Image: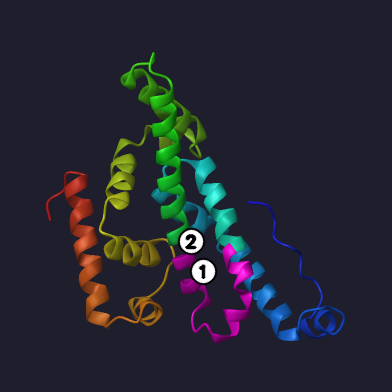
Amino acid sequence: MNDPPTANASCEARGAGSAGSPGDTCSAQRLEQLFRSAHGELLGTLYYLVGNLEDAHDALQESFLKCWRHRHEVPEVGNLKAWVFRIALNTGRDVRKTAWNRRRRSLIADPASHPETAMGSIHQTDAAQRPDAQLIRDEELCRVREAVAHLRREEQEVFLLRQNGGLSYAEIADAMSLPLGTVKTRMRAAIGHLRCAVGESS
């Protein structure tokens, strides 16, 4: 992801000399700081969702832009990290859908190619884009990623906010306006599905 605009000056100093209010400047700085500190967690979460590093980077950039456009809402946000992660999850789903449609159109546009060959090429491209050779060789992790991608949306959201976002169950419940028991139930369901996906007993 390209670095967001740099915010080195204090909120008061920048706010006094800018078109935006000091509050907007402080909100911008908070977003910039969070995206820098949580860059790895966000990228890992998006990689789980979209399946390759290039699309994950695109989704991360788009997530930042969406948050930036809504930075005026930041002062009203109780848990900024949860807010950002939810926007990132929604963006990742959109990117995954767009990427799949793009690949499907590419296959249809080339009737001379065999689907098996084309899909093999896609898999090879994805493999080349993954972070490192260890991840490429890790078939179990690939199965887990696929399982995460196929979780029900509400289970997927809770799982990724917990595992990748590092949020507590109470923070997730607050961010999603859900009872704490519901959050824990969804997490248990997600873990159960993932265990089945990697061949473990529940």
Position of residue 157 in the picture relative to residue 27 (left or right): left
The residue to which callout 1 is attached is 84
Q: How many marks?
A: 2
Q: Residue at x 63, y 79 (%)?
A: 72
Q: Residue at x 59, y 85 (%)?
A: 75
The picture places residue 62, in percent across and down from the top left corner, at 57, 56
The picture places residue 65, in percent across and down from the top left corner, at 61, 61
The residue to which callout 2 is attached is 88
Position of residue 151 in the picture relative to residue 71 (left or right): left
Q: Amino acid at mark 2?
A: Ala
The picture places residue 152, in percent across and down from the top left corner, at 25, 59
| Residue range (magenta) | 66-87
Q: Residue at x 58, y 68 (%)?
A: 67
Q: Is residue 199 magenta?
A: no
Quadrant hosting residue 60 = bottom right
> Residue placed farthest to the top in the image?
112
